[in-house]
Amino acid sequence: MIKPVLTLALMAGIAAGPAHGASLSFSNAESLTPISQDGLLALFDTNMGILQGVRLTLSGTGSSSFTLTNNAGSSQAVTASSRIPMYFSSSRPGISATLDALVPALLLEASTGPLLLAPGATSTFGPIISNQSLVLDTLAPSLFSQSGGGSFSLYCENSDEKRLAGGNTAVSLSLVTQAGCGATVVYDYTPYPVSEPTSVALIGLGVIGLLASLRRTRRSARSAP
């Protein structure tokens, strides 16, 4: 009875997975543009293991509401569109240098499609939703790690643009946009193995506990009427 238990305990003590992953994220709700948002992400603690790779995903969502008025005495064929460029930076200079080179990091676009506006008519379209994300997976692990861990901030800002094709000056366009940003970081790492003396000590304590439990069970069985 004891030998199989001891074998299983030893096998459990020496088994270890080759790699681990940790995912952390933040997401901000949309607000009227121009936005100035931020979020916190955790740094990898080098005491946990060896960081093998980092995957940072930047995400943005936006909505555009269009109001068009035809001031002409005849129908006008038009198309209205919007662009919301989003820019990211970081409290960590090395990360920020990478993000600053992305001009812009994300570009959210929306369009009404072709429209025919009647003379004197005012029409509203939207909100039209747009989303985009960008995955960065060639970043240097050293930018995202330090002993003891900690955190870093990501910041995002935007501008917006409106465009009107057709209608010349006879059609006026009003645009209201909202935007929000977020990010996710995934750390792929190999944990440090537990040292052999520590492993043996832990296994020994576990086996002692198992043996003690078995002895108590046998004594109870003998004393039972």
Image (tube, grey):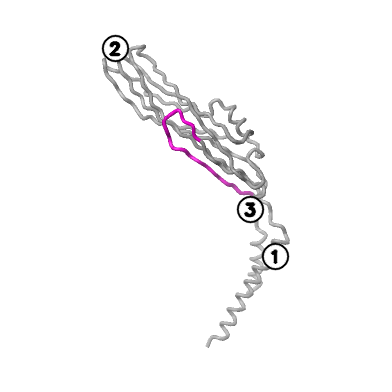
Magenta-tinted stretch: 19-37
Magenta stretch contains residue 33: yes
Q: Callout 1, which amino acid?
A: Ala
Residue 72 numbered mark, or none: 2
Q: Callout 3, which amino acid?
A: Gly
**Residue 145 coordinates in the image, percent (x, y):** 64, 42
Left or right position of 203 against 224: right
**Position above or below: 196 against 182:** below
Residue that carries the numbered disc 1 in the rendered image: 201
Which SS class for mark 1? Answer: helix
Q: How many numbered circles does the render carry?
A: 3
The reply to whether callout 2 and callout 1 are in contact (CB within 8 Å) is: no
Q: Callout 2, which amino acid?
A: Ala
The residue at 50%/33% (across/down) is: 133
| Upstream in sequence: badge 2 or badge 1 | 2
Image quadrant where residue 219 sits: bottom right
**Residue 40 coordinates in the image, percent (x, y):** 54, 41
The residue at 33%/26% (across/down) is: 125
Q: Which is closer to the viewer, label 2 or label 3?
A: 2
